[in-house]
Image (spheres, rainbow, N blue to C red):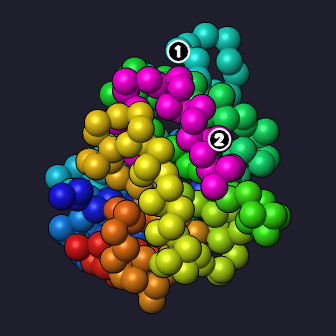
């Protein structure tokens, strides 16, 4: 039985005051029986770690460097994330693939760097609208995952995978539970061929998950929780989504 996981991706939102209000709202609403984490902007990691002390909500970051350390101005290493108490790091979010031209191989290298420091990578895969309409959904997500499987080899069972159709992120369009489940099943089959741990691995769905659609999505056999953007910025909405994953 896989424990459901709900992860809030705050993206580039927040301020010290707004974060404090959001975190105290979460404290009032929790705890939940699902595992819950928030991935916050780098500057707020240390303060958020303190605010989460004694709470069941875990800390995560939104990206990490593929490199260990050195002359990489502006980069943040996974060792630093581990040092700050991060349990998770998102890698390969479609916004980074699109705006920062991150390749499948770079995403895989970031996942490897994270695992090397005990930080669990949440590896995002997903197709664009044009790719879906061209019937390429499976080909695209399998190619993205294959790079990670090839790079991590026997460690692949340690990652969390997130299926995030690009056309559903921040658009208000959501994959139907059936559409999402069918891609999740494809991904689990691919993981199954790579590791004996595939049945224990969590595959999250992300893309306009809201309080009113979360329960139906999370009820699907291969959907093990969600990666939540916009709705993670309101404590009450995020709490409903976390409860839907109970
Ligand atoms: C995301 O940022 O990963 C995401 C799924 O965003 P939203 O929930 O806003 O679509």
Graded by Cα atoms within 10 Å as few (under 14), some (14 to 19) or many (20 or more), the crowding at tag 1 reads some
Q: Nearer the viewer, residue 33 or 14?
A: 33
> In the picture provided, is 205 more to the left or to the right than 26?
right
Q: Nearer the viewer, residue 245 or 175?
A: 175
- Image coordinates of residue 237 in percent, x first then y, are 42, 81
- Image coordinates of residue 42 in percent, x first then y, are 53, 42
Q: Nearer the viewer, residue 205 or 135?
A: 135
Of the residues under marks 1 and 2, which one precedes in the sequence? 1
Query: Residue 217, located in which quarter of the rendered image?
Result: bottom left
> In the picture provided, is 184 more to the left or to the right than 71?
left
- Image coordinates of residue 167 in percent, x first then y, are 71, 68
- Looking at the rendered image, the quarter that the C terminus falls into is bottom left
Furthest-top residue in this view: 70
Q: Is residue 140 visible?
A: yes
Identify the element where label 2 is drawn.
helix
Q: Which residues are magenta?
A: 138-160
Badge 1 vs badge 2, beta-carbon distance below 8 Å = no
- Pointer 1 residue: 68
- Looking at the rendered image, the quarter that the N terminus falls into is bottom left
Using the image, tell me which numbered label, if any, was put on residue 143. Answer: 2
> Residue drawn at (79%, 39%), measured in percent from left and top?
101
Instruction: Nearest to the eye among marks 1 and 2: give it.
Output: 2
Query: Residue 215, located in which quarter of the rendered image?
Result: bottom left
Graded by Cα atoms within 10 Å as few (under 14), some (14 to 19) or many (20 or more), the crowding at tag 2 reads few
> Residue drawn at (45%, 89%), measured in percent from left and top?
212
For ligand 1, tell me if the residue under mark 1 lies within 8 Å.
Answer: no
Using the image, tell me which numbered label, if any, was put on residue 100. Answer: none
């Amino acid at each position: 039985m896989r424990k459901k996981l709900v992860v809030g991706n705050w993206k580039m939102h927040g301020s010290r005051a707004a974060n404090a209000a959001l975190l105290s709202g979460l404290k009032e609403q929790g705890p939940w029986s699902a595992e819950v984490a928030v991935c916050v902007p780098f500057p707020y990691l240390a303060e958020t770690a303190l605010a989460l002390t004694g709470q069941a909500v875990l800390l995560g970051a939104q990206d990490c460097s593929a490199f260990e350390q050195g002359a990489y101005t502006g980069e943040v290493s996974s060792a630093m994330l581990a040092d700050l108490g991060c349990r998770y790091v998102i890698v390969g979010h479609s916004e980074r693939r699109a705006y920062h031209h991150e390749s499948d191989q770079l995403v895989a290298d970031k996942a490897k760097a994270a695992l090397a420091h005990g930080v669990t990578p949440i590896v995002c895969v997903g197709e664009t609208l044009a790719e879906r309409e061209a019937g390429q959904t499976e080909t695209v997500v399998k190619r993205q995952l294959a790079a990670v499987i090839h790079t991590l080899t026997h460690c692949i069972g340690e990652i969390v995978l997130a299926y995030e159709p690009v056309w559903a992120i921040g658009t208000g369009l959501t994959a139907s539970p059936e559409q999402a489940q069918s891609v999740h099943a494809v991904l689990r089959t691919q993981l199954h061929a790579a590791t004996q741990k595939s049945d224990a691995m969590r595959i999250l769905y992300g893309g306009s998950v809201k309080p009113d659609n979360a329960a139906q999505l999370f009820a699907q056999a291969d959907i093990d929780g969600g990666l939540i953007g916009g709705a993670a910025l309101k404590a009450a909405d995020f709490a409903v989504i976390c409860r839907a994953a109970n």
